[in-house]
């Protein structure tokens, strides 16, 4: 099959959606399929920068979320034009609701993978107000996207319920996120990774997160006040970077904190290898909860004990006390207690169980086979 991954967002970029596309596209290639990637930037970077982004900056001061609406209309238009250039036998895997709309308008068969809550996430990170024109616009787009795809896959059951509630569709398959176990098998040796990163002898807690409110990195920083024996290494960037550094300073944690910035996916292996435990302290924001996090899966596949918030899709990955630990969200002392347990002698057992669980249930090759069946069911052009 000739398969085009399409999204209105940047690709590649730091984050779970981009990692999902990387892993799935590689697995589908191994199965003999021809893969392409279609994004607004790849189609027309000048139009994206000067028309979509430039127009958005000019319109946003007028209020009513006009800038955001303009930017998304332009991204949708650019993506639709790019998909219309594809051959009619091309199948689209849309990685967001707008990409599904673009595929339908281009007359192409489409499977939509739902990674999150388009409108709720816009409310949580873009400063839109509840009940605003922007919210109503995003809701219309989100619903249209769900109705545009021939097939839908969500990455957790809570998202499936969300899609059904918005669109009335129940023909939805849940495919939790997955990873390439070959990546985990090629991790550096623990001691070598620590030496490479210049880490001392203290236990290392890794927090591999974009620095956005819903990822709860501030909870991990605050938890270190209750865990004086450990060092926290944060890998990721985002709008909360400076605020988190300031919080670390206020709490007197600068000597036990490392903010490494964003790293390409290939560069994450050394961090997982150097870690003694992994923290994924996500918090609910504007109704948005973490899905089946790839960061959690990578931590588990690395054989590290993962301590995560008991929300959303994280509860579908971790059975607390068996293959990781779940703690209440937005509670630094609870996170610290969980990390202390993960760093205790039970940690290696949790890590081994986690690795076995991921190998059995979240293999990229098995997921690619399931996606391949979905695409075959779409029929011919």
Image (cartoon, rainbow, N blue to C red):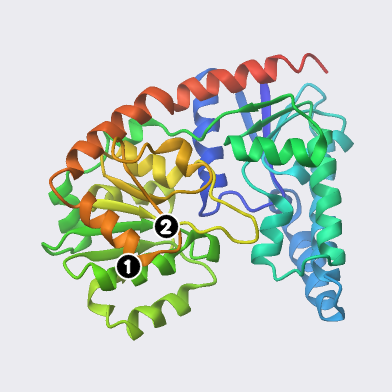
| Quarter of the image where one finds residue 51 | bottom right
Name the residue located 72 percent from the left edge and 58 percent from the top edge.
45
Q: Residues within 10 Å of mark 1 (few under 14, many from 20)?
A: many
| Quarter of the image where one finds residue 297 | top left
Q: Secondary structure at mark 1?
A: helix
Residue 129 location, x and y as percent?
77, 70
Which numbered marker is on residue 334?
Answer: none
Q: Is residue 296 left or right of residue 132?
A: left
Q: Is residue 339 left or right of residue 92?
A: left
Residue 378 location, x and y as percent?
76, 18
Quarter occupied by the C terminus: top right
Which numbered marker is on residue 281?
Answer: 2
Check contact, mark 2 vs mark 1: CB within 8 A: yes
Q: Is residue 300 left or right of residue 179?
A: left
Residue at the spot of label 1:
223
Res. 75 in view = yes
Residue 317 location, x and y as percent?
43, 37
Q: How many marks?
A: 2
Q: Secondary structure at mark 2?
A: loop
N-term-proximal mark, 2 vs 1: 1
Seen from the viewer's position, the closer of residues 230 and 61 is 230
Seen from the viewer's position, the closer of residues 84 and 154 is 154
Q: Residues within 10 Å of mark 2 (few under 14, many from 20)?
A: many
Residue 69 location, x and y as percent?
84, 63
Name the residue located 28 percent from the left edge and 65 percent from the top edge.
232
Res. 276 in view = no
Q: Is residue 79 left or right of residue 266?
A: right
Q: CA distance from mark 2 to mark 1?
A: 10 Å
As drawn, 99 above or below 374: below
Seen from the viewer's position, the closer of residues 209 and 269 is 209
Quarter occupied by the N terminus: top right
């Amino acid at each position: 099959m000739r398969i085009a991954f399409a999204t209105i967002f940047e690709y590649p970029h730091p984050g779970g959606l981009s990692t999902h596309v990387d892993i799935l596209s590689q697995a589908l290639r191994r199965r003999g399929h021809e893969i392409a990637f279609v994004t607004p930037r790849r189609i027309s970077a000048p139009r994206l920068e000067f028309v979509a982004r430039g127009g958005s900056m000019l319109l946003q001061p007028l209020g009513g979320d006009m800038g955001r609406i303009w930017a998304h209309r332009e991204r949708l238009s650019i993506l639709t034009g790019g998909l219309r250039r594809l051959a009619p036998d091309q199948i689209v895997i849309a990685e967001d609701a707008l990409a599904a709309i673009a595929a339908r308008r281009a007359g192409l068969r489409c499977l939509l993978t739902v990674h999150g809550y388009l409108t709720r996430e816009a409310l949580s990170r873009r400063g839109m107000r509840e009940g605003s024109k922007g919210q109503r616009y995003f809701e219309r787009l989100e619903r249209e996207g769900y109705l545009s795809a021939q097939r839908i896959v969500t990455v957790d059951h809570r998202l499936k319920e969300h899609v059904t509630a918005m669109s009335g569709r129940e023909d939805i398959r849940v495919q939790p996120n997955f990873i390439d176990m070959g990546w985990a098998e090629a991790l550096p040796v623990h001691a070598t990774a620590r030496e490479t990163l210049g880490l001392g002898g203290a236990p290392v807690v890794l927090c591999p997160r974009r620095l956005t409110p819903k990822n709860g990195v501030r909870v991990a920083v605050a938890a270190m006040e209750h865990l004086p024996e450990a060092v926290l290494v944060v890998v990721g960037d985002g709008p909360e970077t400076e605020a988190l550094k300031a919080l670390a300073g206020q709490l007197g944690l600068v000597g036990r904190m490392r903010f490494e910035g964003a790293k390409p996916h290939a560069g994450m292996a050394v961090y997982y290898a150097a870690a003694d435990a992994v923290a994924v302290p996500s918090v609910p924001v504007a109704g948005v909860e973490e899905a089946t996090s790839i960061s959690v899966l990578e931590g588990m596949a690395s054989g590290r004990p993962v301590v995560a918030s008991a929300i959303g899709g994280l509860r579908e990955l971790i059975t607390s006390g068996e293959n990781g630990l779940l703690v209440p969200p937005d509670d630094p002392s609870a996170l610290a207690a969980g990390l202390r347990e993960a760093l205790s002698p039970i940690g290696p057992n949790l890590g081994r169980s986690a690795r076995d669980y991921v190998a059995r249930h979240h293999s990229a090759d098995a997921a690619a086979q399931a996606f391949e069946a979905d695409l075959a069911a779409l029929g011919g052009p």
